[in-house]
Amino acid sequence: MIILFGAAAGLFFLTGICSIFYERTFWREQGKKDMMGWIDRPGLLLYEKTQCLMRKFERGREAERRIREQYRAVFLGQDEDVCRRREQARIWGYLWLSGIGISIIGIAFCLQTPDPDLVDGNRLTRPSFGEGEAEYEIFVSGLGEETERVTVTVGEQKPPEEEMRKIFDETFREATETMLAGNPSMDEVRSDLTFSRMSDEGIRLEWESGNEEWLNSYGEIVRTDIPQEGVIVPITLVMNGADREAVYSFSVRILPPVKDLSYYREALSEMLQRTAESNPQEAYVELPDQLQEYHLEYAMPEDKGGAYLAVLGVLALAALAGMSGRGIEVQYEKRSEQMMEDYSQIISQLSILILCGMNVRNAWKRVVGDYEKRKAKGATPPRYAYEEMRMTSRELERGAQEGKAYEEFGRRCGIYCYVKLGNLMEQGVRQGAFGMGDALRKEAADALEHRIHEAKRKSEQAETKTLLPMFVMFGIVMAVLMIPAFLTF
């Protein structure tokens, strides 16, 4: 498995190196400058090679044509090939980066995977001393047609006597080092000791103080009136492990505490706590300004809200960066919805103008002109359907064949009703405006009915979306009612 992950990582890194030269060559052939980041370059290489592979299949060629049309429809007046390659390069770039991360994690996982527990098909690995028992679930075949599942508990290894003695001695050394807990040595104990109850190897430790008056079995110094010459306290340590026992005896000298920084910190904490607990009827707690020979000053900790805000800002930027890779499908759907909203108005305008005696071309030009005036005044934002009509109007001004231009308009829009509108316009050019008014009037009525149905559908969706806030409010009300009831018990 590690070979597979390693090969994948090498392939991804090689793709990244090759993409540097490929990207420069690609844009040079396109007659454009280098305008991609380090993530987009391997994405461009992967996207182009994948497209080359997909073009060998009919379904892949159809998908590419459909995507081209979507990009051309969304990015009006721009080079759709460049827009498509740049956005797809970003998406494939993130996939390339994710592939590198998954490969590296896979390699690390394979390197950390332990040796198989079942060796040579019939030997279970016994845990080493200190690891405790291991429970294995194995499958046994040969008893019948079906495989049996059996659970086996295997105890840890028990070392020989001499090795166990070394383990006890090493455990004693580590336990006494841990026991000091900041004290210089056993002959200079000025603070509480730390009596650990279990070693890393699983050996149980039992401590016993020979003088409970000064030091208890938890390692705590009981009295504070310790003489300057100190007090000798014998300690017994009993260790049990692997069905064996070892007893160690030693002594420590307890001395009065040294007035260092830790001593003053503990004294300050005790003094402040006593002050806070005194005079509870007062509105304020008067903090002492003197601790023995030291003068005290107080200040509140700095507000870390700015740091938290910075972290939230970084997370928000990361979230926005992740959302920036939305596909062209979402933008294309929004374009289609907007064009469907404008269809009934467009078809109504055209039908009125043609019924008033205008020919098809002048009616088309009049609708586009009204839109451009509203757009210039800021009364309306850019609308996809009107922009497509304006593009058709420009083509007619450049001398394009009128019927062909209307038919191309419907094809560019890619929506059935606009394809039908283009055909009606092309039919009006060929056969004249006679009879065309009735067809446009009927189409306008159908468009209006469709718009009404669409408005009802969106209202139903809006009602469905309001259910979540209602459930949240219901949960809050239930919490307000139930939590006090539970707290009374």
Image: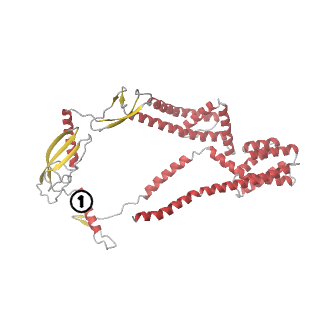
Residue 319, compared with residue 53, is above or below; it is below
Quadrant where the C terminus is found in the figure? bottom left
Q: Is residue 278 above or below residue 144?
A: below
Quadrant location, the N terminus: top left
* Residue 12 relative to residue 286: left or right: right
Q: Where is residue 232 in the image (x, y as percent from the top left)?
A: 11, 51
Query: Does the image show residue 326?
Result: yes
Image location of residue 279, percent across then percent down: 29, 72
The picture quadrant where one finds residue 200 is top left
Front-most of residues 413 and 124: 124
x, y percentage for residue 387? 73, 49
**Looking at numbered disc 1 in the image, what kind of residue is underneath it?**
Tyr
Mark 1 nearby-residue class (10 Å; few <14, some 14–19, many ≥20): some
Coloring basis for residues: secondary structure
Instruction: Classify residue 328 by image quadrant.
Output: top right
Q: In the rendered image, which residue does mark 1 sit on?
A: 264
Q: Quadrant of residue 2?
A: top left
Say which element carries label 1.
Answer: helix
Residue at 79% x, 52% y is 444
Residue 366 can be seen, yes or no: no
The image shows residue 183 at horizontal and vertical percentages of 20, 50
- Number of numbered labels in the structure image: 1
Q: Nearer the viewer, residue 197 or 151?
A: 151
Report the residue at 41% width, 28% height from top: 141
